[in-house]
Image (tube, rainbow, N blue to C red):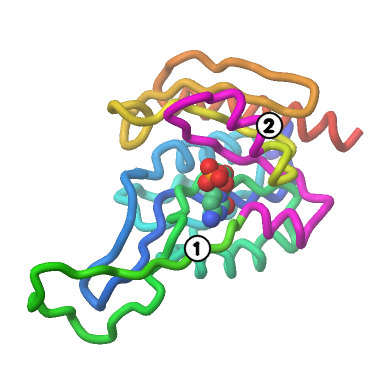
Amino acid sequence: LSEGPLQGVKVVLTAGPTREAIDPVRFISNRSSGKMGYALAGALRALGAQVTLLSGPTNLPAPPGVTRIEIETAEQLLEQSLAAARIADVFIGAAAVADYRVEAPATEKIKKNEAKMAISLARNPDIIAQVREAYPQLFIVGFAAETEKLEEHALGKLKRKKLDMIAANWVGNGRAFDRDENALSVYWHGGAQELAQADKTRIARELAALIAQRYAAKKS
Ligand code: C5P
């Protein structure tokens, strides 16, 4: 690995779901498997990058040569992201961060007494947006999982979160989440590329090559 377009480049990548505790035994989460993020971590490593993977709970082994830090909640992911990104060149947000956390998790297991119950939720921080605020020079790549208006929503996020690149995919109806295959529409300022349906390992290699290309273009 002494060569490759990302030789010596420090990459921080978030992947997998977050878990937001309801009580000591229950949580809110989502169907993210972490497969896309883990495959991308491996592909970036293969191009020579030094990769730190900040991962929510998954069943996946850490790709060889990648440093993994495990987190559960969005707030833990934010803290680790800000710390790790401080010395990074590239930050990639592939995690499916829970948009809301339980406002006041119970300290004891909740008993089933009432016929109905309500849980109050609070907005989670937007990690990728906060990383951008903290580190204006960083090359930042986001993901957008959409069930409608893919391009419009992806371009909106590219601008709003001040990203350098965004990889968008259709979700719902069994697409992408917890699947072995994916297709991506990748956008950056002044360009776009479609990565056709393929297994996530192959899509990850193509996306890693594109990231290397755009990163080099921004630096020069
Ligand atoms: O706004 P939306 O959640 O669709 O944006 C997706 C992108 O933002 C992904 O890159 C995701 O990892 C990141 N994100 C984040 N923190 C959140 C929500 C999303 O970093 N709280």
Marker count (numbered): 2
Rendering quarter of residue 211: top right
Residue 2 at what x, y percent from top left? 70, 39
The residue nearer to you, when weighing 108 against 104, is 104
Quarter of the C terminus within the rendering: top right
Amino acid under disc 2: Ile
Residue 23 relative to residue 102: left or right? left
CA distance for labels 2 and 1: 30 Å
Q: Give the residue at x 76% y 62%.
A: 134
Up the image or down, 92 lies above or below 39; here it is below
Q: Give the residue at x 83% y 50%.
A: 137
The residue nearer to you, when weighing 14 against 156, is 156
Q: Please, which residue is most extreme toward the right here?
A: 220
Residue 41 relative to residue 181: left or right? right
For residue 200, say whether it is visible.
yes
- Residue 96 forms part of the magenta stretch: no
- The residue pinned by badge 1 equals 123
Marker disc for residue 49: none
Amino acid under disc 1: Arg
The span shown in magenta is 128-157
Residue 40 at what x, y percent from top left? 52, 37
Up the image or down, 163 lies above or below 138; here it is above
Residue 56 at what x, y percent from top left? 41, 57
The residue nearer to you, when weighing 3 against 147, is 147
Q: Give the residue at x 44% y 15%.
A: 197
Q: Are marks 2 and 1 in contact (CB under 8 Å)?
A: no
Marker disc for residue 211: 2
Residue 186 relative to residue 114: left or right? right
Element at badge 2? helix
- Residue 137 forms part of the magenta stretch: yes
Up the image or down, 61 lies above or below 164; here it is below
